[in-house]
Image: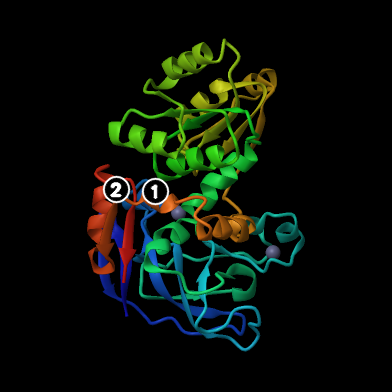
């Protein structure tokens, strides 16, 4: 089997890797229908997170079950399944609380840019669809594995309610899908922060009512202007830089909420500033598993089409071009089909 392996900054290769097999009795092996490149894959790709050894890549996946271990009872070969980037048992106290990405037995699923994938804790991790979906539904179902699930979590964590004013910081794929999430949750005003015309357009398609192109303090001032000096009820942060976090905190009203799902790089918070902000902070790696059943229904019934976020589709063996296109911001998100 050949799959994607990252060797160092901007050096991703499609090369021979061991074919996954059932190792534990709770594993499943799935044949990937589609996978993709994540914004978070760009951190190691750009060398921001150092790579110490050749590392298989990919954590967003959906596909058809090939084989299951003897203790797997809830999924069976032939089913189409979607799972999260963290395998979880879905039975421990953290899972029961809805935080499967903090499962006591969580395992990262990190080698999905390949034709076959081993998924640990298959019963807790994988959610089957009612039948094998049509080809055109696969991109939308794939987004539920991370990017859409993460967008949904950001909106959920920021307490988006019908009628709310929402600010979305970041116009990457997750940012755009947070716009879609907030819109689906009934937000009245959705202010997207974006400087890129094509992304502004997609943000509006997904439900943004206003776009702010400014950055940093100017952006915060603009949000204050647009909200009569008050700030937004819910702010969704998905970049993970000190600037984006400051922008998010600055945009929230007193008593408002910031949902943050961008993996932080160098973000520190000033306790005193935070104290006087009166703001709710909730975020982290999205417990995608919690939302899968509901989001699968939305996609299945045509209530949302998050697959529109993919603006590049490549055969899996051209995975390197997928990374390049996203790194150079020629593409929002690259879909890969084996
Ligand atoms: Zn991801
Ligand atoms: Zn658990």
Query: Which residue is the site of mark 1?
Result: 39
Q: Is mark 2 within 8 Å of ligand 1?
A: no
Marks 1/2: CA distance?
8 Å
Q: Which residue is mark 2?
A: 326
Q: Which of the numbered marks, if any, corresponds to residue 155?
A: none
> Judging from the image, what secondary structure is the residue with disc 2 in?
helix
User: Where's the C terminus, which quadrant?
Assistant: bottom left
Q: Quadrant of ligand 2?
A: bottom right
Residue found 53% across the figure and 37% down from its top = 183
- Residue ID at (33%, 59%): 335
- Asked whether mark 1 and ligand 1 are closer than 8 Å, the reply comes as yes
Quadrant for the N terminus in the image? bottom left
Horizontal relation, residue 267 to residue 50: left or right: right
**Residue 170 horizontal/vertical position (percent):** 43, 35
Q: Callout 1: few (<14), some (14-19), or many (20+) C-alpha neighbours within 10 Å?
A: many
Residue closest to the eye, 42 or 211: 211
Q: State the residue at coordinates (67%, 54%).
A: 99
* For residue 59, side relative to residue 286 (left or right): left
Tell me whether circle 1 and circle 2 mark residues in contact (CB < 8 Å).
yes
Reply above or below: 184 against 142: above
């Amino acid at each position: 089997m050949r799959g994607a392996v990252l060797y160092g900054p901007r050096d991703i290769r499609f090369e021979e890797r061991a074919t996954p097999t059932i190792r534990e009795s709770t594993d499943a092996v799935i044949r990937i229908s589609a996978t993709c490149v994540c914004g978070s894959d760009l951190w190691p790709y750009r060398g921001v997170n150092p790579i110490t050894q050749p590392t298989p890549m990919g954590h967003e996946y959906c596909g058809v079950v090939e084989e299951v271990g003897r203790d797997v009872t809830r999924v069976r070969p032939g089913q189409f399944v979607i799972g999260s980037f963290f395998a979880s048992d879905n039975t421990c106290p953290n899972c029961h609380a809805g935080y499967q990405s903090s499962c006591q037995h969580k395992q990262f699923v990190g080698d999905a840019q390949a034709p076959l994938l081993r998924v640990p804790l298959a019963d807790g991790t994988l959610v089957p669809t009612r039948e094998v979906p049509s080809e055109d539904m696969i991109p939308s179902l794939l987004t539920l594995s991370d990017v859409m699930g993460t967008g949904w979590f950001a909106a959920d964590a920021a307490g988006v309610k019908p009628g709310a004013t929402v600010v979305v910081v970041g116009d990457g794929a997750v940012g755009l899908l947070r716009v879609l999430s907030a819109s689906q949750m009934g937000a009245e005003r959705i202010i997207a922060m974006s400087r890129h015309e094509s992304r502004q357009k997609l943000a509006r398609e997904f439900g943004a009512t206003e776009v702010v192109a400014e950055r940093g303090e100017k952006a915060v001032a603009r949000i204050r202007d647009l909200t009569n000096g008050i700030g937004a009820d819910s702010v969704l942060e998905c970049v993970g830089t000190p600037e984006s976090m400051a922008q998010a905190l600055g945009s929230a009203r007193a008593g408002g909420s910031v949902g943050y799902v961008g993996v932080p790089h160098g973000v520190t918070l000033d306790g005193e500033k935070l104290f006087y902000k009166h703001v709710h902070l909730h975020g982290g790696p999205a417990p995608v598993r919690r939302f899968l059943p509901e989001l699968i229904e939305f996609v299945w019934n045509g209530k949302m089409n998050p697959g529109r976020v993919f603006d590049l589709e490549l055969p899996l063996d051209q995975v390197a071009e997928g990374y390049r296109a996203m790194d150079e911001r020629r593409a929002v998100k690259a879909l890969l089909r084996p």
